[in-house]
Amino acid sequence: MRDRPKPDWYQWWMTSADRTSTASVTSPVAPGSSPGDLFQLLLDGTPRTRAELAQLTGLARSTIAARVEALMESGLISAVGEATSSGGRPPSRFAFDPSARAVLAVDLGAMHAVVAITDLAGRVLLRRRTDLAIASGPTTVLDTVVAEARQLLEVLQLTAGDLAGVGIGLPGPVEHTSGRPANPPIMPGWHGFDVPSYIRRSFDVTVLVDNDVNIMALGEQRMHWPSHDNLLFIKVSTGIGAGIIGNGQLQRGALGAAGDLGHVRVGRGGDVLCRCGNVGCLEALAGAPAIAAGLTGTNAHGSDDLVKLAEAGDVATIAALRQAGRDLGEVLATCVSLLNPSVIVLGGALSSAGDHVLAGAREVVYARSLPLATSQLTIARALSSTDASSDDAGVIGASMMVTQHVLSAAAIEDLLVPRTREPVTP
């Protein structure tokens, strides 16, 4: 990536950092009728010849040739061999080149940061996990992220100029259009902080920010449930939240607060005070600190301690996790009736403590939800939490958030306009 010469108009992409809304890049034109739409046909990675592209789009071969040339110059597609010749020189095939640029993908939790570099297909090239308290404040946390990112780029022999964009997940509500956290309950000092502008001081590219559970939902669906368009991803850790995918689209809500399940009141809550100021919240009963505080005779403080105790067979811990699952199931039963998902995926640190939370959630959801809503419902542990890629769902989702923006038809169209627009006759 580093040694590839950049076209003159490549700077447009690198300076489009103020474009923070994926809604602004929805293409209004018919498939194949613009250079950006032509590029969408190649995003699946299937190599195609100019003739095949002309047949798919109905465009003239001369038009296809000009647009393929422009996309080749951008580095976004490349020649990948030749097709069988029917006489004369074999035609070249072209396909999307995910290595054309890199993406900085960041997943921030209450007590950790995962920083990764991916290619444009979301493949993780290198990542690093660091213990980092989100309560340290935005400048401390983001400075650490930038430092980690620079080290990863150096190891990969890349520079900031190779980045197409930056995607960041935060453990709290985010106004996605501005990238600013909105009254996050566990993030003191973050409310209204301009995260994209701060990051662009170091990396002058598009910076997109969302709730961490939203990006984990995107990543988990992409990695393990691609055929399911109605999915709930539940993160059970220090806090509890949901990423909602409905009809294939991430649902953020009016102010980015959709899916904040941790602060829904549950029947067993009584007068238990939550750190948000309300009483009876799910998080105050089933969040990792609350579970740990309810255990006697242990030194458990958070998720890691609970996981270790459960793995060691501690009966009291296992029972507490099972009850936390039941409390979660009470809230999820309402979600099932309201949203009718086909899959509910439990992720987060506590999901790796065996199937105890999962079992409790299933018990209540299947008992309290109507048979029609559960007849084809799968409730499963996040597959990314059961293997070596346990940190990848968040960073892959953050990468997807960026690539869906910068590789959209309208974004590519704007990128190629200087090369494809006919000169105006005075």
Image: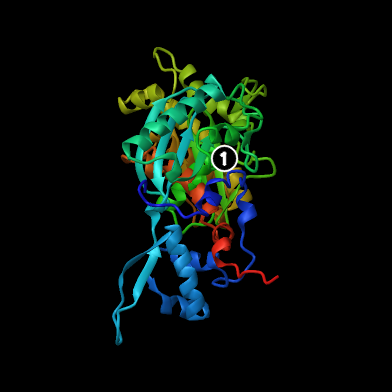
Find residue 250 and report its horizontal and vertical position in percent: 57, 50
Which residue: 40% across, 12% down? 297
Q: How many marks?
A: 1
Residue beneath disc 1:
210
Q: Amino acid at mark 1?
A: Asp
Residue 327's spot in the image, x, y percent? Answer: 54, 33
- Please name the residue shown 62% across and 22% down the image: 189
Judge whether 310 appears above or below 394 on screen: above
Seen as rendered, the residue at the extreme bottom is: 87
Mark 1 surroundings within 10 Å by alpha-carbon count, few (fewer than 14), some (14 through 19), many (20 or more)? many
Q: Nearer the viewer, residue 351 or 295?
A: 351
Res 268 quadrant in image: top right
The vertical placement of 207 against 424, above or below, is above
- Residue at 44%, 41% (x, y): give it: 395
Please determine whether, in this image, residue 55 is positioned above or below residue 69: below
Q: Is residue 102 left or right of residue 417?
A: left
Which percent across, then down, holds residue 277? 67, 21
Toward the viewer: 73 or 278?
A: 73
